[in-house]
Amino acid sequence: MAKVTSRFPTFILLSLGLFLWAPVAMRTNSLLFIGGCSAFSFSSFSSSQHLKQLPFSWTRLDTVGTGTTTASSSRIPSTTRLFSSSSSSSSVISSNPDLLPGIELIDQYNAQIQDQVDQIRQASYFRLFCVDILASCEYMPQELFECYSETCEVYPVDDDDVPSVLRTTDYQEKDFEMDGWARWDMPSNDYYDTEEFPEGYTGYDGSEIWKFIHEKICFDIQQQPQQQEQWKADFNKAVSGVHAVISAQVARGIQDKVEAGEEFTAEEVWRDPKIEFDRRLGPNGETPMAMENLYFAYMLFLSAIAKAQPKLLADCQSGKMDGAQTEMLQTFLSLPLFNDPAIQGVSKQLRHHALASPDNLWEVRMRSRDLLRIMNCVQCNKCRLHGKVAMMGLSTALQIHLGTDGNGGDPNRLNRVELATLVSTLYKLSSAVDFCQKMRSS
């Protein structure tokens, strides 16, 4: 008897497979098949820990505003997953006993820190930066992108608005070290004012930049790193903390547009600030540890500024800063939390982890240089300016804590740009924490 081949069972099986698979794909937003076309997005791993057993995380890559991305938290060591976003308390609940005291202390002092640093950064010393805003991207091929929105543009200040002592200081302090930390742009006549062009919601899509940072610059380590790799996890955690600042900035920008009654463009898909906050920064969102990483970075910066206090005060007395801001800086540096063990504990932990593998710390310095240079690939000029400030600030904090051998660097060797970006980025962290506090209590 002749064998009969039927296509019907095969069709049924294929249809059943697609029926069962489709809800999963739509739920994870990993693949969307519409009209026969495939649209997919790779996770940027904003948590910054790359699991070797999970080379890809198929999660939605959402990018609006200043270029933030969100992704699964699977790449972060599982130190904590507990936050109380619905509680009216300013404290954040954490299962990590080493971080909880510092987190509670930051919540207690943050309003005071934000107010004082906001006044301090009005000084030219902390707001003017010589930046090569037209530097070429060296890390990825890019199509020419013109940002026609006024929110993206920045312009150099007039030469007369740059104090001569500031320009002279930057020229004299510029140095080159082969195996040094992040290298700021060479001094030129073009200075940009971060107060004249403040960080804000621009609508720029920086997904490719963050994807590159988390996949190429951050360390590739296991979810539970070995003792000799803990310093790598610390680096990734600090980078993720800076990324959380951008996520908060995006959610706040959406909220500002809603409160101002401004219309959203067709490209602006995400329009609910609470939903975006929960998704990007909340404990049940796509990066459950985002807020902890934010506080972790905050503690690193506070303890770094405490160590840089003598150099900052010396610059105060040298006439490099304005008089009013000098007095405010002195008052700010006298806050008791700078030397509180709850804040300094993160610095001690970082050095303890680094000393377990001191011969490999050159990798951190190399990555700090990469973090700054990848900002040249940002095609929104305002985002590029503030991104460079933030990454230079992070590099400076790590430089103070680690130095070249894990025992810490010499703060007295820091230049004006390093100190200015350190303080400027502290304000960004403080502002992000303030926004998170308000959203958690709302």
Image (cartoon, rainbow, N blue to C red):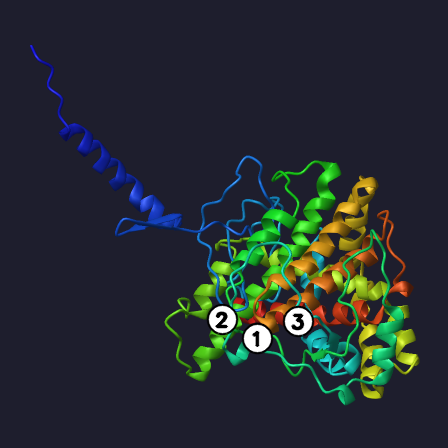
Farthest residue in the bottom direction?
A: 160
Classed neighbour count for the residue bearing mark 1: other residues with Cα under 10 Å, few (<14), some (14–19), many (≥20): some
Residue 203's disc number: 2
Mark 2 and mark 3 in contact? Answer it, CB < 8 Å. Answer: no
For this view, does 59 lie left or right of residue 313? left
* Sequence-first tag of 1 and 3: 3
Q: Amino acid at mark 3?
A: Ile
Answer above or below: position of 201 versus 213.
Answer: below
Residue 8 location, quadrant: top left
Classed neighbour count for the residue bearing mark 3: other residues with Cα under 10 Å, few (<14), some (14–19), many (≥20): many
Q: Amino acid at mark 2?
A: Gly
Q: Position of residue 201 (x, y in %)?
A: 53, 73
The total number of labels drawn is: 3
Residue at horizontal 74 percent and vertical 75 percent from the top: 129
For this view, does 143 lie left or right of residue 399? left
Q: Position of residue 263 (x, y in %)?
A: 39, 80
The N terminus appears in which quarter of the rendering?
Answer: top left
* Sequence-first tag of 2 and 3: 3
Between 42 and 158, the one lying in front of the other is 158
Residue 200's disc number: 1
The kind of secondary structure element at disc 2 is loop
Q: Is residue 89 visible?
A: yes
Determine which residue is flagged by label 3.
Answer: 133
**Label 2 vs label 3: CA separation?**
19 Å
The kind of secondary structure element at disc 1 is loop
Residue at horizontal 52 percent and vertical 65 percent from the top: 144
**Label 1 vs label 3: CA separation?**
18 Å
Q: Indicate which label's residue lies in the foreground, 2 or 3.
A: 3
